[in-house]
Amino acid sequence: MIVNICCCGSSGSTFFSNLMNRHPEIVCGDELSLFSKPIVYDNYNHLKKWHFLIKRTGITSYPYFQNRTILRNLQSFLLTKKQVWRWVLESNNVIEFTSKLKSHISKITGKSIWAEKTPTNIHLIGRFLKFFPEARVIHIVRDPRDVILSLMERGASLFRGAERWLTSTSAIRNHRNHPNVLEIKYEDLILESEKTLYRVCLHLKVKFDMDFFATSTYESKNIAKKDGFDTWRSRPGDDFSSKSIGKFKNNAIDFRDILSMTL
């Protein structure tokens, strides 16, 4: 099975991906920026034709977002650009390519479920579900006030942070009721962790045991994961902590106008 983990940035997806990686059946490494690129769904032959240029300069995801990176962090999966782009050329579509990628990841980790966490995947969930009808999607949503403050700590303006949260949550709005999509709240993940992770395991049809997530016993040792941004109060590999919940309460920003626009 393939699992697509998406959200607005700074919504706890890195922490969640570390939890998923601890499960004995699930592997979740660093962001690949694969399922967030329109070209892989809409014009795979164009990707193949211009691969020599795209693998050097990336490719735009306009109008969804500006980041150009594609197939990054390959070293965390014991892969090289040469190997991966060879698979791109050998495949006829993104489905075949993803199959090759997943087979490699399962082989080096011994896990049958691959979860790909890239927040900007959220903009193309409709396409993903169409191409991968058996896959699962997990959408993490966090209080927009805390998201915006976190994005501001990383250099975004108040306006840009609000825009990013609104456009991200709007992008998945029409797919929230899809049977293969599960939406969880970051606050529930922290404060009601057992109940929330049970829902996740039920959605993925895997065994639930809270011990899987309480320790790193089952974490994929062949997958190297980043430790997040310096501005984060909690490290992604830490245990459950409420330190990042309700930060807005100690801030002077008036969020009422922004909240009036939320979905």
Image (cartoon, rainbow, N blue to C red):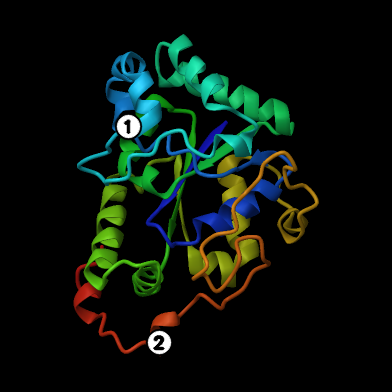
Alpha carbon distance from label 2 to label 1: 38 Å
Q: Secondary structure at mark 1?
A: helix
Q: Nearer the viewer, residue 143 or 91?
A: 91
Q: Which residue is mark 2?
A: 249
Q: Is residue 125 above or below residue 82?
A: below
Neighbours of disc 2 within 10 Å: few (<14), some (14-19), many (20+): few
The residue under label 1 is: 127
* Image coordinates for residue 63, horizontal then vertical, percent: 20, 42
Q: Earlier in the sequence, mark 2 or mark 1?
A: 1
Residue drawn at the location 55% of the way across and 44% of the way down: 30
Q: Residue at x 73, y 47 (%)?
A: 219
Residue 171, how many percent across, how many down? 27, 48
Q: Quadrant of the C terminus?
A: bottom left
Q: Which mark is residue 82?
A: none
Amino acid carrying mark 1 in the image: Arg
Q: Nearer the viewer, residue 2 or 227?
A: 227
Q: Identify which residue is drawn at 67% across, 29% down.
A: 106
Name the kind of residue labelled 2 in the image. Lys
